[in-house]
Image (cartoon, rainbow, N blue to C red):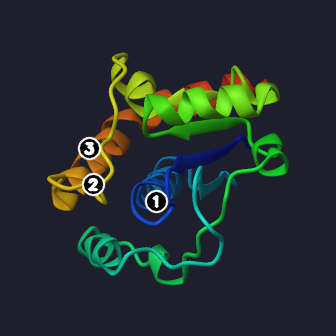
Amino acid sequence: MPSILIICTANQFRSPLAAALLSRQLELDHPNSAWRVESAGTWTKPGFPATSFVTHIARDFGLSDLETHRTRQVDQALLSSFDLCIVMEAGHKEALDNEFPSARGRVYLLSTIVEGVPYDIPDPARPGVDPVEVAHELKSLIDNGTARIVRLAQALAGQN
């Protein structure tokens, strides 16, 4: 089955939550398939847990996956092992395309995949950004866009 890496900046809120949401949706929609969905950060240090706030939100969404989450940084080996890499911000895509040219063509902005319109999912670590709104935006994008994500991942994996 195809593999999907979801990437944000610190790998402590957006990407682990989106990965957990997508994993659950894939289990529901494709119960006999072995999808690989993981997360990473563009500018993080390995080994940190998800924020306690996102862990709480995840529990509210019926997810327990974030309890054991630990951050990891994107590198060439990690990117190479995934068919589709989904990012939260245009800056993530630009940085990955420039630093890891071999990943070009496999890095997509979440909003572009799901809604066909490129826009950033804001980082809740930034002042003025409501983490609850970000979590609900991610849930909505995953709930409404899983079929599009699946089709793109399958195409990139060579599985039409």
What's the amino acid at mark 2? Arg
46 up-or-down from 24: above or below: below
- Identified at 16% across, 56% down, the residue is 130
Earlier in the chain: of badge 3 and badge 2, it is 2
In whole angstroms, how far apart are the C-alphas of marks 1 and 2?
28 Å
Q: Which residue is labeled 2 in the image?
A: 126
Q: Secondary structure at mark 2?
A: loop
Mark 3 neighbour class, 10 Å CA radius: few under 14, some 14 to 19, many 20 or more: few
Q: Residue furthest top?
A: 116
The image shows residue 59 at horizontal and vertical percentages of 30, 77
Q: Residues within 10 Å of mark 1 (few under 14, many from 20)?
A: some
**Side of 102 where 65 appears, left or right:** left
Q: Residue at x 71, y 40 (%)?
A: 2
Count of marks placed on residues:
3
The amino acid beneath tag 1 is Arg
Between 35 and 18, the residue placed more toward the observer is 18
Q: Which residue is mark 1?
A: 24
Reply above or below: 138 against 106: below
Residue located beneath label 3 in the image: 140
For the residues labelled 3 and 2, say whether their Cβ atoms are less than 8 Å apart: no
Q: Quarter of the image holding residue 146?
A: top left
Q: Which mark's residue is nearer the viewer, 1 or 2?
A: 2
Give the mark, 1 or 3, whose residue is nearer the N terminus: 1
Residue at image x 78%, y 51%? 78
Q: Which class describes the residues within 10 Å of circle 2: few (<14), some (14-19), or many (20+)?
A: few
Q: Amino acid at mark 3?
A: Ser
In three-dimensional space, the C-alpha distance between marks 1 and 3, rounded to whole angstroms, equals 14 Å
Q: Estimate the spatial distance between the alpha carbons at disc 3 and disc 2, rounded to whole Å.
A: 21 Å
N-term-proximal mark, 1 vs 2? 1
State which quarter of the image contains the C terminus: top right
Q: Nearer the viewer, mark 3 or mark 2?
A: 2
